[in-house]
Amino acid sequence: MRTQVGIIGAGPAGLLLSRLLWLQGIDSVVLENRSRDYVEARIRAGILEQHTVDTLTAAGVGDRLRREGLEHSGIYLQHPGTRHKLDFPSLCGRSVWVYGQTEVTKDLIRAQLDGGPPLLFEVSDVVPEDVDGDSPRVRFTGADGTPQVLECEVVAGTDGFHGVSRPTVVAGTDSRTWERVYPFAWLGILAEAPPATDELIYAWHPEGFALHSMRSPSISRLYLQVSPDERIDDWSDDRIWANLATRFALEGWSLNTGRVIEKSVLPMRSFVSAPMRRGRLFLAGDAAHIVPPTGAKGLNLAVADVTLLATALVRLLQEKESDLVDAYSDTALRRVWRCTHFSWWMTSMLHRHGDDFDARLQLSQLERVCASEPAQRELAENYTGLPIGS
Ligand code: FAS
Ligand code: PHB
């Protein structure tokens, strides 16, 4: 098999990269080790920045998003007894959209399979080779069990935190990694309950953080802070709802409950690996960095990476100019660190941890943000997404 760009991983990063390259006349093949059903069923992010919505729309996969997505003009920050609205359009002129990552992935897969570049599911034994030269390749075993070799000019590693691409980059470069594992996790539920709020609620509480998000007018997405070694089997639906009701409690307001259709515990970490390149192998998305979901950055950062990478690869493969690919890692990492800081800041401010001194500092920070327009503007600009390249 031969193509111009071999893409390892069919998450949002790999699928969008393939789509953006195809629109510019660049061939690619996407290799995914899971099944289509598995990939489409993974429940993850829910908030899209405007640049993500604009990028998906320009790539021709934004129709359902604009029909079914929910544009949101802000968030609530809460601490016991107080719930404060941050109005994004008045603070920074931007808003965000609520549209599940599962739906983004389904839209991208549907477009890819409808006349787009090859997308091979359930491959295995994927190994990028000779990435230091101009003729890299990717060895893999096809879904039918036959060994395959994909000859290409460039390999994109969009295979997430547990993929094979980052280890290949680390093995062949003077790489550095930074990691912060947080002393807490999120227990997330998807419930058949109409959202009890018009905007997302980020709530600090002495018993732990809670987040009220949603997926549609009839489906709520909620999270509560738990310890990292928490077992989901120890959390009955009743226990989950009781903890959420306690943490969101506010005079004259009540939480809507309903049938829990999915629940899981997800760990929280910050992780960055630099550089995001080894020769003709380029990393994008979770393959290179992980942010705690408190800042709603993960998916949007992956989109920002591939927006940059697609432009750089078109210039390399069509104009034979390497200036943008040579700058890719440094340019991408500037935004990665900005999003990493913002996600760490939101996580540290809102999650109960440490002693009472820590709690007083957090409450002081929250009260300051709720009282200061400049402080709210800084949060709003980061949450809705800084301009690409800034
Ligand atoms: P992904 O991990 O989505 O995709 C990588 C793909 O590569 C996967 O399909 C995987 O199967 C495939 N792959 C892996 N190894 C391979 C190999 N060797 N060969 C071939 N294919 C391989 N972000 C938010 O903003 N908000 C959230 O609430 C949120 N919640 C999350 C919950 C969980 C449990 C996780 C893990 C992440 C969450 N994220 C959240 C972050 C998430 O949305 C990521 O940022 C986003 O999926 C990044 O997309 P990709 O970089 O494409 O990586
Ligand atoms: C979600 O809806 O899944 C969601 C929203 C905001 C976050 C994290 C997750 O910060």
Image: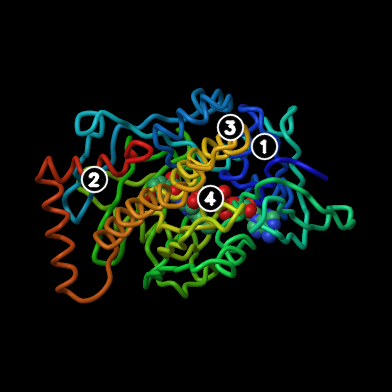
Res. 109 mark: 1
Q: CA distance from mark 4 to mark 2?
A: 25 Å
State the SS at label 4: loop
Res. 47 mark: none
Counting from the top left corner in percent of width and height, residue 293 is at: 41, 54
Q: In terms of depth relative to the viewer, which is nearer, 152 or 54?
A: 152
Which mark is in front, 4 or 2? 4
State the SS at label 1: helix
Residue 260 is at least partly visible in this image: no
Res. 284 mark: 4
- Mark 2 highlights which residue? 379
State the SS at label 2: helix
Res. 319 mark: 3
Residue density around tag 3, few if under 14, some if 14–19, many if 20 or more, within 10 Å? few
Which mark is in front, 3 or 1? 3
Disc 4 Cβ-to-ligand 1 distance below 8 Å: yes
Image height check: is 221 above or below 225?
Answer: above
Q: Are marks 3 and 1 in contact (CB under 8 Å)?
A: no
Residue at the location (52% across, 39% down)? Answer: 312
Q: In terms of depth relative to the viewer, which is nearer, 2 or 356?
A: 2
Counting from the top left corner in percent of width and height, residue 217 is at: 45, 33
Residue density around tag 4, few if under 14, some if 14–19, many if 20 or more, within 10 Å? many
What amino acid type is highlighted by mark number 1? Ile
